[in-house]
Amino acid sequence: MARLHIRTGVDPDEPDVPVVTLLVDPDGPPAERTVARLGDYCHEGDGVFYLAQTDGWAERALSGDRLAVDVAVHPVALGQVGVDAAAFAERSPVDPEAVLVLRVEAGVEPELCARAASATVVFPAGPDDTLDDLLDAEDAWPMVLAPPPGA
């Protein structure tokens, strides 16, 4: 099951800024495998992979102390990693052409969420991997998802 965290110390350039972080299992359910595969389509940066906002993004909704993060991706980007967009029925409210491939929810501190960076970070992670382990690993390159277009 995908895991959602929000905490500081994720971005070495801004260690005091909270970051919404998802851990997805590349061998897990189809939605998680799809998100993990998107890393193959990203642009390489300084220790991270960037998914272009024109290809996909992370949509967030906070309700009380519950944060929901939806990963939205355009069908062309899914096709580039061998995923059929028809496998996903839900569409993004931001752009109906984009498919919602994953939703992750968790309880969060609303104050921490209010200060969070706009980007969402995604790590491929097995069920036994922890966020701390991934942050300590030099070879664990996360994928960075921008907020929705116009946000």
Image: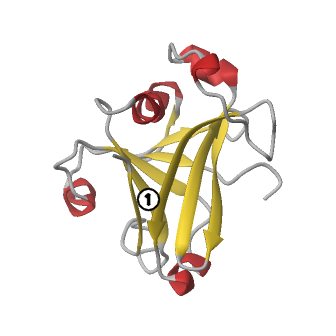
Amino acid at dot 1: Thr
Name which residue lies at 45% across and 65% down: 106
Left or right position of 84 against 28: right
Left or right position of 66 against 75: left
Name which residue lies at 43% across and 65% down: 11
Q: Position of residue 59 (x, y in %)?
A: 65, 53
Q: Report the front residue among 76 and 94.
A: 94
Q: Position of residue 79 (x, y in %)?
A: 59, 15
The answer to which quarter of the image holds residue 132 is bottom left
Q: Is residue 95 above or below residue 20?
A: above
Q: Is residue 77 above or below residue 108?
A: above
The answer to which quarter of the image holds residue 141 is top left
Left or right position of 62 against 12: right
Q: Residue under label 1, please give it.
A: 21
Name which residue lies at 55% across and 67% down: 67
Hey, which residue is sitting farthest front in the picture? 89
Which quadrant, please, contains the C terminus? bottom right
Q: Secondary structure at mark 1?
A: strand
The answer to which quarter of the image holds residue 10 is bottom left
Q: Position of residue 107 (x, y in %)?
A: 45, 72
Q: Position of residue 119 (x, y in %)?
A: 58, 58
- Judge the density around disc 1: few (<14), some (14-19), many (≥20) Cα neighbours within 10 Å: many
Q: Report the front residue among 86 and 133.
A: 86
